[in-house]
Image (cartoon, rainbow, N blue to C red):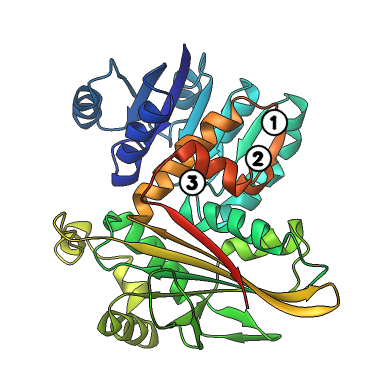
């Protein structure tokens, strides 16, 4: 029975990943959860009701990390690190590591120790999840039939009722507040607009241009010269608010506020839907003709989809011999992953125009 550890398991996303690992492996794993708060970690382990073990882990204590992360088959990382300590320990111990980080500045640090992973015949997957992660798989599928790619646009329609928690909200606000490179110019994030099609919507939705770390990866790995990322929320008033907060510089202030205060603002209503939509639009040349291909995905929850992607990717990855730092689209194809996820509430449609 494979032993799997989830580091950062007590957060909203961490709990969902634990649930999904148990589901996709059909209870045939030994699951270990970690936390730097003993009581909280023990409560989580008990709540999962599948003989889950708890271990104390403080990511800032390197010796503690080395003591805890050993004799494990897979480690899933759901918390932020300044340096890839967990990855390095996993590499030294030949443990497959899967990280949901959405930020390229951290991925760069993991890439620095890539040789260590290769020397130890160990895989270290980064940017697992919905956006990035599933979005990259959708791009790879969408561009596959083109002889020449002119432009790729990736759009995320978010839900204000998303079960993202404080961390998820702060991550997305950080992303939308960053400057964006567009047509060889640097412009403020979340200002330039365009419309895109989304599944289950009669009209195109207006989105705003953002900087996204996956762009750098796809430009390098898939040789896509022009790729842009866009997002908006399903409530126009909220988009206006976010834009205003970015203009006055308040998003930077929000990151410094007390999380108790923020929890009063970020509310998830379990009785309301949290549907999210992701679209990849490719313009290019096929058989000497200009074509536009669209791959659009609808899901019941972006956060739960991140958990499903991560758990299913983990199952597929541990069956393959992976070496070095790798991205989800280098491990699996979109259709293979969706088949493993096996969720009727995640639907993909494709068409050309």
Residue 44 image offset from top left, x and y in percent: 23, 29
Pointer 1 with pointer 3, Cβ within 8 A: no
- Residue at coordinates 24% horizontally, 64% vertically from top-left? 161
Which residue in the protein does label 3 denote?
100
Q: Nearer the viewer, mark 2 or mark 3?
A: 2
Left or right, 332 with reference to 230: right
Q: Earlier in the sequence, mark 1 or mark 2?
A: 1
Q: Nearer the viewer, mark 1 or mark 3?
A: 1
Q: How far separated are the C-alphas under marks 1 and 2?
A: 8 Å
Residue 223 image offset from top left, x and y in percent: 78, 63
Which residue in the protein does label 2 denote?
331
Instruction: Say above or below: 208 vs 255.
Output: below
Pointer 1 with pointer 2, Cβ within 8 A: yes
Of all residues shown, which one is farthest toward the top? 1
Residue 227 occupies quadrant: bottom right
Instruction: Say above or below: 165 vs 343.
Output: below
Pointer 2 with pointer 3, Cβ within 8 A: no
- Secondary element at tag 1: loop
- Secondary element at tag 3: loop
- Residue at coordinates 37% horizontally, 37% vertically from top-left? 17
- Residue at coordinates 25% horizontally, 32% vertically from top-left? 37
Residue 277 image offset from top left, x and y in percent: 41, 65
Q: Nearer the viewer, mark 1 or mark 2?
A: 2
Residue 322 has which mark? 1
Q: How far separated are the C-alphas under marks 1 and 3?
A: 17 Å
């Amino acid at each position: 029975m494979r032993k799997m550890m989830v580091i950062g398991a007590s957060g909203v996303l961490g709990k969902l990943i634990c649930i999904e690992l148990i589901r996709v492996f059909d209870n045939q794993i030994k699951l270990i959860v970690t936390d730097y708060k003993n009581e909280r970690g023990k409560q989580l382990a008990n709540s999962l009701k599948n003989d889950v073990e708890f271990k104390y882990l403080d990511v800032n204590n390197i010796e503690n990390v080395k003591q805890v992360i050993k004799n494990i088959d897979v480690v899933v990382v759901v918390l932020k690190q300044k340096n890839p300590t967990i990855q390095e320990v996993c590499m030294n111990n030949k443990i497959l590591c899967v990280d949901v980080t959405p930020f390229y500045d951290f991925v760069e640090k993991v890439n620095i120790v890539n040789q260590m992973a290769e020397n130890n015949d160990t895989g270290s997957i980064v940017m697992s999840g919905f956006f990035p992660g599933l979005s990259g798989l959708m791009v790879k599928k969408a561009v596959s039939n083109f002889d020449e790619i002119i432009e790729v646009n990736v759009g995320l329609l978010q839900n204000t009722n998303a079960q993202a928690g404080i961390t998820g909200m702060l991550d997305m606000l950080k992303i939308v507040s960053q400057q964006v490179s567009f047509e060889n110019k640097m412009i403020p994030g979340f200002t330039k607009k365009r419309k895109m099609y989304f599944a289950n919507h009669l009209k195109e939705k207006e989105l705003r241009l953002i900087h996204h770390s996956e762009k750098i990866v796809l430009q390098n790995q898939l040789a896509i010269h022009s790729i842009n990322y866009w997002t908006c929320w399903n409530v126009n008033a909220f988009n206006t608010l976010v834009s205003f907060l970015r203009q006055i510089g308040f998003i930077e202030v929000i990151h410094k506020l007390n999380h108790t205060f923020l929890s009063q603002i970020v509310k998830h209503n379990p009785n309301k839907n949290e549907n999210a939509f992701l679209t990849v639009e490719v313009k290019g040349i096929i058989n000497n003709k200009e074509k536009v291909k669209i791959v659009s995905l609808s899901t019941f929850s972006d956060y739960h989809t991140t958990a499903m992607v991560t758990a299913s990717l983990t199952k597929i990855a541990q069956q393959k011999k992976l070496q070095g730092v790798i991205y989800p689209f280098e491990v699996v194809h979109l259709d293979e992953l969706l088949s493993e996820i096996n969720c009727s509430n995640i639907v993909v449609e494709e068409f050309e125009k």
